[in-house]
Amino acid sequence: MTELNFPAPLQAALASKGYDSLTSVQTAVLAPEAQGRDVLVSAQTGSGKTVAFGLAMGADLLEGDRLPEGELPLALAIAPTRELALQVARELEWLYAGTGAQIATCVGGMDYRNERRALQRGAQIVVGTPGRLRDHIDRGSLDLSALRAAVLDEADEMLDLGFREDLEYILGAAPTERRTLMFSATVPSAIEKLARDFQQDALRISAQGEARQHGDIAYRAYSVTARDREPAIFNLLRTHEAQTAIVFCKTRANVNHLLARMSNRGFKVVALSGELSQQERTHALQALRDGRARVCIATDVAARGIDLPGLELVIHADLPTNPETLLHRSGRTGRAGSKGVSALIVPSSDYKRAQRLLQNAKVVAEWVKAPSADDVRARDDERMMDHPGLTEEVGDDAPLAAQLLEKFGAEQVAAAFLKLWREGRPAAEELMETQAPPAPMAPREPREFGPSVWFTLSVGHSGRAEARWLLPKICDAGGITRDGIGAIRVKQDLSYVQIAASQADRFGDFIEITPEVTMRRMQGEPDLDAQAPRPRFDRDDRPARKPAPRKNAPDSEGHKARVKSARGGWLPDDAPLADPRTEGPRPPLKAWKKKSSAGEGAGKPAWAAKGKPRADRPGTAKPHRKGPKRPG
């Protein structure tokens, strides 16, 4: 490590921690081309990113072998979750222990007054979550005017959690000449845009081995019946007896359900979900770290940012929704050169979905049956025979051991030991036999089609087009059979079809196969891997069609009849009907005869005169005839 350019106090800290060499991401950020520049680093979870940015900003912060004393922070590290922020602070504490660094944390759920006092004492490095950091800036307790380096850790997760506005506010309060380091497991377009907004001439770094997808993790898929999904998880935990294991569920309800069942069976288990307070989360994580609990059940969101030392087993109780989630879950094990297992519990109805998930993630999993009750008991017997208490010297307990043998005999003492050994563990679960999952389908080899001509169709996925829907329409339009059609490739806004050269002239250069879909001959072959723009078809190319007459058109017979009826039939039958669009307003309707302006009822219609029955009103239906009276 001495040939790399980073300060001596940090080298001493790494040596005291037992670092013989640096990881690929740590080496990349210390390369000469990265010195003093903004960097955008993509590296998988567990690749040593925290130590990497701690080393990278060392030259920007240290003056000699010490950090300068002052009231304002020099470095800021932003993390998406409380647990990750506290973990980053712990890593930086031992890394900068020999530099006199004061590190303050600003995270939600902690006492605000303690954080404010830590900032006032003059912390050179501040680590926090976006919401709490913005709160301190608003209240005036955090001044970033002297900031030299800013780090965005797990930037993709911060965007997923909706922190972009807070990040803009925080970085807007820092000097523009600062150095900005962004670390992210993935670099989608949103991260690239964030880098363009907040970085200047950033160096893009992809850590070596990023595409290897966790080579120290063994992926296994366990085929089970639907009713044996949870018992298979119990047997899997019993078989491995991992120091720490994590079980991922899709929803909070699934976490609570599995927690209750495992607690009843005697597992040392804790849960992490969104409904827990910060104090409950801290207690759960501490129980895992000190060994009081060995299994953690969590949702994807609740488990973000947590780091569990000695995590040997990851179980996917519910299948991940996408390959990125699968890799992110699995990346919590197999760290720092240690081995880990990522186990997928796959009911028979999800075989194909699991196979597609693994293929898209570019990982190979071993398909095996879930451990049976006999497998669990056999594994327990192996551990019992390997128990160190059976091979170590008896020591001070020799008199008591001799007394037990003399009183009960060797066979009875051994049977008691065996009983006590088995009583301290959850019982094994009986599982039903399952069939082996079908092998994933191999991609079909393209058939030989011979000389052909390609055509473009004006519809694609956006128009809900499918090959099986297009095939008969193309056959009908050209009068050919399906043997004359080769490949049909449906893209987003258009489709391509391959027609045998001997029958391509049947379609000409342009043809309309339906009133909505047209087909045009191409010159050469299409680039099926590229996203071509949607073609524009000229209206002149379409065959002329006479539009169907509208029922409400002014020159239609139905329209004339309705107008005549609406006018009360007062116009002669042979009178021409005026078109209001061309001949001005239609004549007024005939007014009702009114009474003289003098006397009572003047100005009112005749039917409105006092005492006039309602039946005499024009347009009013005659009253119903009264029926016979009901018998008294």
Image (spheres, rainbow, N blue to C red):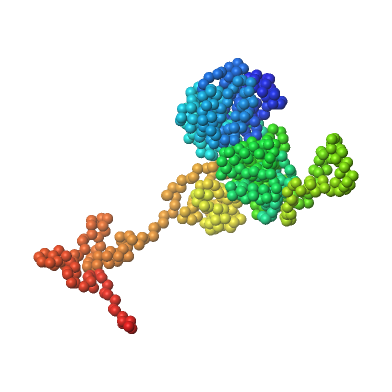
Image x and y of residue 365, in percent? 70, 44
Q: Residue at x 55, y 57 (%)?
A: 472
Identity of the residue drawn at 50% across and 51% down: 463
The total number of labels drawn is 0
Above or below for 621 versus 4: below
Could you say which quadrant of the image residue 297 lies in? top right
The C terminus appears in which quarter of the rendering? Answer: bottom left
Residue 598 x/y as whole percent: 9, 65
In the rendering, at what x and y percent does residue 377 appear? 78, 49
Between residue 231 and residue 259, name the one nearer to us: 259
Depth order, front residue of 517/180? 180
Q: Residue at x 62, y 23 (%)?
A: 96
In the visual, does 346 lie left or right of 413?
left
Left or right of 466: which side holds 426? right
Residue that protrudes farthest toward the left in the picture: 598
Judge left or right: residue 245 versus residue 82: right
The N terminus - image quarter: top right
Kindly identify the residue that appears in the image at 11 percent across and 64 percent down: 597
Residue 10 visible, this orientation? yes
